[in-house]
Image: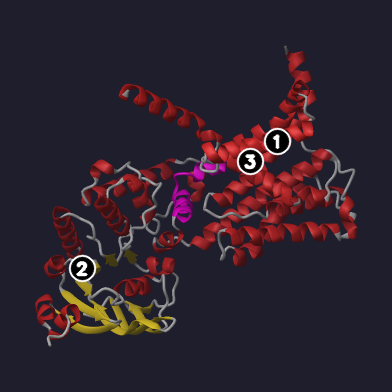
Amino acid sequence: MWDQLADLYATYQSTIAFIGINSLLALSVYTTLSCGQLALGNAGFSAIGAYAAALLTMQAHWPFPLAILAAVAVPAVVAVPLGLPVLRIRGIFLAIATIGFGEVVRLGLVNWDYVNGAQGIVAIPQKTELWMIYLAVAAALFVLARLRGSKWGFALEAIREDEPAARTMGIATTRYKLAMLVLGAALAGLAGGFEAHFTFMVAPNGFGFGRVVDMLVYAVVGGSQIYWGPVVGAAFLTLLPEILREVAPLVGIEPGPLRLLVNGLVLLAVILFLPNGMVSLPRRIAEWRAARVAARSAA
Amino acid sequence: MSPLLALDRVERAFGGVRAVDGAGFAVAPGQVHGLIGPNGAGKTTVINLISGLLAPTAGSIQLGDRPIHGLPPWQVAALGVARTFQNIRLFPDLSARDNVLVGQHLRRTPSLAARMLMLPSARTEEREARERAEALLTRVGLSERVHEHARHLSYGEQRRVEIARALASAPRLLLLDEPTAGMNPVEVQAVAQLIRRVAAEGQSVLLVEHNVRLVMDVCDTITVLCFGKVIAEGAPRTVAEDPAVIAAYLGNPK
């Protein structure tokens, strides 16, 4: 029994780590979504965290815990001067401005010779342990859970539902939005720091536009109305390729294309049938059942 | 007594249209002040100017001895101004009680550390806030609807939740923008009583309203706006008989 579990763990260690890392990234998008802001600069923040931590452990020989703290702090500090101007714009314009920020970070790294440009940093010491990742996920979930239902949690919900009305209640909306952007940047940076010290390498192209779309899809598929939804989405969509790898030979499609197909279908199905994400599935099933019972008793 | 709110030659233009054109009036503490006028007179614009959602293009707005024109809405609210909206702006996916809890934002001073560490002090503060919210909902006659989502409440109920949410900050000045629109006569009576009681407790009310009976019954003073200008001001009876007011509402007799 224990041997089998140990085998399983050895085989899927990387998948288990990435479920945690992707959960942190999904939560980093959720923080701004929780106050109604679609900010998509998180691949950039993650890159800043990853590079900061990698340079500190390799060049400055900092101990890993301090380097991880820097992976949290540096993107959080960068988020303040970015957020002050861009949080004045909203909706799709905020999304575009923050995507622009992410691209600036990526292109900056591509053109920075000190960090080997497009090739990135290699041979980073592997220091990330699974327990660290999951401790971080648990801590993030705990903070978000405690915010919910508090004065600050209600302020965030009020901003999401009607920002001008929230302002007339005395809520300093810009401060709240900035706080959530900073929290999201910190989580994304943390994920980047862990990832760099887990996969031995970081390269700018790992932090492109596609990466932030992945994060957003985790949050949307899992459910962005509740704090643990993004973790469900990240876990499901990170496990999916592993399952499809087993299934692919049975249906006679290459795993790669099959993964893209199924990912697309999952996203489509969630948007059409489960607008509040996978976490709303039990309630939706109950509603469908109730509707069927009602229809039957009517007939 | 020096006024709580004073508008002086306030002007707000939208492009070439002067929605408010040099209007000035003052609201005394503990008074119910009516602001009436034909459609398009600029009443809602005045409310938006006072609450900070709009900035005046000229003139000054004073709350006590502080100028408040140009301040952002959350700072105006922090100085003791609360409002309702003509086109109801509740938080639709929050319950009636949670809407009122948001309204208490400025009154509540919990500690973030206490909340995160789940200390008893945080729990006590939250329970008291919930009880205050439920008491306010009882005051507007909605004790049965506390946990209902705002979007599922009737029109009249939503208006009453908005009043409770505005009162939740314990404001010095309450701005009500057509609080009885869409209400039945029984509900209107209840709102009239509520307004009188709020004023009796020392809070000032600025009431924009089309229901003439209500305005005549509850207001101490009335200001009449027409095309952004003040055309009459005084006690309800005098204003009702003012020829300029009658002309503004009914047109000039030929």
State which mark lies toward you, 1 or 2.
1
- Could you tell me how far apart the alpha carbons at marks 3 and 2 are, in whole angstroms? 50 Å
Q: Quadrant of residue A100?
A: bottom right
In magenta, the rendered stretch is A132-161
Q: What chain does badge 1 belong to?
A: A
Residue A273 seen in this snapshot? yes
Q: Label 2 neighbourhood size at 10 Å, few (<14), some (14-19), many (20+)?
A: some
Q: Chain of mark 3?
A: A
Return the residue nearer the eye: B250 or A230: B250
Asked if both marks, 3 and 1, belong to the same chain, the answer given is yes
Q: Is residue A135 above or below residue B82?
A: above
Residue A218 is tagged as 3
Q: Residue at x 41, y 73 (%)?
A: B54
Q: Which residue is mark 2?
A: B210
Residue A16, quarter of the rendered image? top right
**Judging from the image, what secondary structure is the residue with disc 1 in?**
helix
